[in-house]
Image: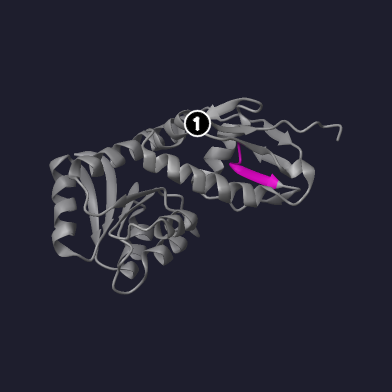
Amino acid sequence: MNKFQVLVVEDDAPIRKLIATTLKTHDYKYLLAQNGEEALMQASTYSPDVVFLDLGLPDLDGVEVIKRIREWSIMPIIVISARSEDEDKIEALDAGADDYLTKPFSVEELLARLRVMQRRISLLQSDTELVESSVYINGILKIDYAAGCAYKNGEELKLTPIEYKLLCLLARNTGKVLTHKYITQKIWGSAWDSNVASLRVFMATLRKKLEDGTENSSLIQTHVGIGYRMLKVDSGQ
């Protein structure tokens, strides 16, 4: 049995059974929850590796569940929802979701998204083991790699796991233009169109958190149709 554990939060019994059967067939361990409160209890008690989360729950909206989990955990959350409007996707991603899968979905894509998360977790664990003990400083930005924290003008930034990983990726490649494909491969493990769309959302929120209205706060430069670059701020400014 695969030790990787998935929490499935879904109030629709047939879909919940479909996901559970798929996970069982592919040797994943899983937990089931039918509503938001049960999901929060299961998440806090068992600390699953990944959460599959429906947004239309009978007691709590899924976005609220994401926000509550993000208060104490960075566990990956994949939204599985019939809500297909961009606004719904953006709201879920802004709240801290890591991926968004629209219903109806194929079990093949569901498993592919799960494998992406497994690769991401493995990469993060490797990064943790090899993490630099140094501190990155660029203008108003400071990243303490060992502590896993970023600061703006000395104040800690409240970043989602994806935002922090994006920031570190750009920082470690300061001055280089990173393409959309390169970034999405590094962050999500794939270059799906949905991941490029998610990247734009995360970059927009990251920029808002970084900028403070001064010239030196514009650290991330967009190269339209290509990607993004972390600018090097002259220490003498």
| Residue at the disc numbered 1 | 127
Identity, as a three-letter code, of the amino acid under mark 1:
Asp
* Camera-nearest residue between 144 and 183: 183
Residue 33, picture quadrant? bottom left
Q: Can residue 102 be seen in this view?
A: yes
In the image, residue 16 sits, relative to residue 215, either above or below, namely: below
- Residue ranking furthest to the right: 236
User: Could you tell whether 25 is left or right of 115 in the image?
Assistant: left
Q: Quadrant of the C terminus?
A: top right
Percent across and percent down for residue 45 are 35, 59
Report if residue 150 lies within the magenta region. yes
Range of residues picked out in magenta:
145-151
Circle 1 packing at 10 Å, graded few (<14), some (14-19), many (20+), is few
Left or right: residue 115 versus residue 95 is left
Please identify the quadrant where the N terminus is shown.
top left
Query: Residue 188 falls in which quadrant of the image?
Result: top left
**Residue at the spot x=73%, y=51% of the render?**
212
In the rendered image, residue 46 lying in the magenta stretch gets the answer: no
- Dividing the picture into quadrants, the one containing residue 143 is top right
Residue 14 lies, in percent from the top left, at 13, 60
Pinpoint residue 39: horizontal percent, then vertical percent.
32, 63
Q: Which of 62 and 135 is in front in this view?
A: 62
The answer to whether residue 72 is seen in the rendering is no
Query: In the image, 15: left or right of 45?
Result: left
